[in-house]
Image (spheres, rainbow, N blue to C red):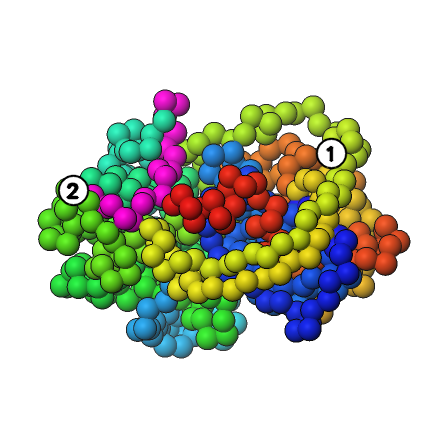
């Protein structure tokens, strides 16, 4: 993160400026967060890149990115918790009956697949407590949970297939070793965003193959059958089997809506995999306990979807070998929606991977290696500023007018909240030179920041106490309790704590850090998260909004 401070005395008659969401094709360096200081306050909803600011105003409790950090495939630094990710919802929803209409039926279903453990067959009672007992009187709620009904339905053959490195047959499209985007080191990386002013069949097919293979490489990182069905620890997302089937489902449903396809590939799958989670009260999280299709069944579905989409790209008359303009009126706008949607889930699912128990993940072949700094092992457990992580001085930034909004004719896919126009007048401010590092946040942790309610907003404190958080989620204790010694969890492995890497925390933790830092510095100014408009003023002229508009 970075820090900023307003140096002008500009006032606003409206009192508060609220910016629109905008995403450009140019990503910030590593996409991590920034702190800033200033009087100008605005909601910042830039997907995936929460920024930190200093301000004499408090940032309103409004939609903001949920993490200081963004998934970074190439360097392995990882992803922040993206609590406000863009999600596509179709009009139709479907009711799912999870393993019977009542607890008794659910218990019977679970008992039907209970396995023998140490020679004792476990039986689930029909009582409301759902207690499992064996000859030793074990309370097996800790051993058997509703979602486990999905495991071992084929005598272990699927689990064996999914354990260890994937075979060639795992990939339902082009194999990563032969896919557009494969590099000399064997790692598969993303192709550049297509220019929709001149889309050829070849370009559409290559970008589809690249997106599809990247997603399947990531899912090759699940080790065994269990991580496909185990719900995340926080219960706010579906198990990974849903996301394995969700992205192909969207391709089919949206291409049907646009008229490219006439019929479903698998109508049942295209209902249960259609709608994800938006963290709203009406989300059907009971789906986490349902009997899902097997991984083999979804794998076969992915094959069928891949072949269907490839045939559409190669034969539909609205595309050509010479290139056509694909805009919002073109039927293949839905295809590019599928690309962008798949890449959103490449990022958000990588966070779920990072939250999965370590023994249930593995680094897949063709996954880009982590940044070389991750291999540093002779690191202290008690970091020192300017030695183990850089000091974070304040840098002045000149204010300016910032025009937010994506032109309707911009030649890249965009979600509806990216369009429109809004001019934001940003006063002078100061921003921290660097992103806020693990080393800086360590000071907040060791000073009792997680124990002191005064630094937290009401919702943030409720979250912290509910989760019993004492340090960032991706920090893993590596010493005795109370020693404040930590390692760092990456997507597929645990590495020594890198004190000079940007910290990954959520919005509540970032806001608490801002209040703590203001108190420690004993100044009249307070810190806050960077606004979207201020974020754009930090970009170099080669990569800012004007540059993107002039050279798509």
Q: Is residue 539 left or right of residue 300?
A: right
Q: Position of residue 288 (x, y in %)?
A: 42, 63
Cβ atoms under marks 1 and 2 closer than 8 Å:
no
Q: Earlier in the sequence, mark 1 or mark 2?
A: 2
Of the 4 image quadrants, the one containing the C terminus is top left
**One can see residue 154 in this view:** no
The answer to which quarter of the image holds residue 509 is bottom right
**Does residue 198 belong to the magenta stretch?**
yes
Stretch in magenta: 184-201
| Residue nearer the viewer, 193 or 298 | 193
The image's mark for residue 390 is 1
What residue do we see at 88% from left, 53% from top? Answer: 522
| Residue nearer the viewer, 270 or 8 | 8
What residue do we see at 41% from left, 33% from top? Answer: 367
> Dot 2 corresponds to which residue?
322
Q: Quick one: label 1, few (<14), some, or many (20+) residues within 10 Å? A: some
What residue do we see at 31% from left, 39% from top? Answer: 210
Question: Is 471 located above or below residue 493 in the figure?
Answer: below
Q: Quick one: label 2, few (<14), some, or many (20+) residues within 10 Å? A: few
Q: Is residue 185 left or right of residue 520?
A: left
| Residue nearer the viewer, 286 or 18 | 18
Q: Secondary structure at mark 1?
A: loop
**One can see residue 394 in this view:** yes
Q: Secondary structure at mark 2?
A: loop
Q: Main secondary structure of the magenta part?
A: loop
| Residue nearer the viewer, 157 or 168 | 168
Mark pair 1, 2: CA separation: 52 Å
| Nearer to us: label 1 or label 2 | 2
Q: Position of residue 444 (x, y in %)?
A: 78, 48
Total number of numbered discs in the rendering: 2
Question: Is 164 located above or below residue 338 in the figure?
Answer: above
Q: Position of residue 8 (x, y in %)?
A: 76, 56
């Amino acid at each position: 993160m970075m820090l900023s401070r307003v140096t002008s005395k500009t006032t606003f008659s409206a009192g508060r400026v609220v910016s629109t969401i905008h995403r450009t094709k140019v990503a910030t360096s590593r996409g991590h967060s920034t702190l800033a200081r200033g009087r100008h306050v605005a909601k910042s909803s830039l997907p995936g890149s929460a920024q930190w600011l200093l301000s004499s105003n408090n940032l309103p409790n409004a939609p903001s990115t949920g993490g200081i950090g963004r998934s970074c495939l190439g360097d392995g630094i990882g992803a922040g918790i993206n609590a406000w990710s863009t999600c596509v919802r179709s009009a139709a929803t479907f009711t799912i009956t999870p393993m019977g209409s009542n607890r008794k039926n659910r218990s019977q279903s679970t008992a039907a697949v209970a396995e023998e453990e140490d020679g004792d067959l476990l039986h689930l009672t029909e009582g409301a407590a759902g207690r499992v007992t064996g000859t030793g009187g074990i309370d097996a709620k800790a051993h058997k949970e509703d979602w486990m009904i999905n495991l071992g339905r084929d005598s272990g053959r699927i689990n064996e297939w999914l354990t260890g490195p994937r075979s060639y047959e795992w990939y339902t499209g082009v194999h990563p070793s032969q896919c557009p985007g494969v590099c000399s080191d064997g790692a598969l990386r993303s192709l550049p965003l297509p220019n929709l002013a001149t889309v050829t069949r070849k370009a559409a097919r290559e970008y589809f193959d690249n997106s599809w293979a990247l997603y399947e490489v990531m899912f090759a990182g699940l080790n065994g059958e269990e991580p496909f069905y185990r719900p995340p620890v926080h219960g706010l997302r579906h198990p990974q089997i849903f996301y394995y089937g969700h992205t192909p489902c969207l391709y089919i449903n949206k291409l049907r809506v646009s008229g490219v396809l006439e019929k479903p590939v698998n109508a049942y799958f295209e209902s249960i995999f259609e709608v994800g989670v938006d963290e709203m009260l009406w989300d059907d999280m009971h789906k986490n306990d349902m009997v899902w299709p097997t991984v083999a069944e979804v794998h076969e579905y992915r094959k069928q979807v891949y072949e269907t989409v490839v045939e559409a790209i190669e034969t539909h008359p609205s595309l050509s070998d010479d290139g056509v303009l694909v805009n919002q009126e073109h039927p293949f706008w839905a295809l590019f929606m599928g690309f962008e949607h798949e890449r959103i889930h490449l990022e958000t699912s990588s966070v779920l991977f990072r939250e999965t128990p370590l023994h249930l993940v593995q680094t897949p072949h063709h996954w880009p290696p982590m940044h070389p700094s991750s291999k540093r092992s002779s690191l202290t457990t008690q970091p020192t500023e300017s030695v183990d992580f850089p000091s974070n001085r304040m840098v002045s930034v000149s204010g300016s007018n910032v025009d937010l909004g994506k032109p309707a004719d911009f030649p890249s896919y965009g979600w509806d909240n990216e369009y429109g126009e809004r001019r934001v007048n940003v006063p002078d401010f100061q921003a921290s030179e660097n992103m806020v590092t693990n080393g800086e946040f360590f000071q907040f942790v060791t000073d009792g920041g997680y124990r002191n309610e005064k630094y937290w907003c009401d919702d943030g404190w409720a979250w912290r106490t509910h989760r019993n958080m004492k340090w960032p989620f991706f920090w893993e204790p590596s010493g005795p309790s109370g020693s404040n010694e930590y390692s760092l969890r990456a997507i597929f492995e645990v590495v020594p704590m890198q004190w000079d890497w940007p910290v990954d925390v959520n919005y509540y933790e970032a806001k608490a850090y801002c209040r703590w830092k203001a108190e420690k510095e004993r100044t009249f100014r307070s810190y806050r998260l960077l606004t979207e408009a201020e974020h754009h003023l930090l970009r170099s002229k080669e990569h800012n909004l004007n540059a993107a508009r002039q050279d798509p």
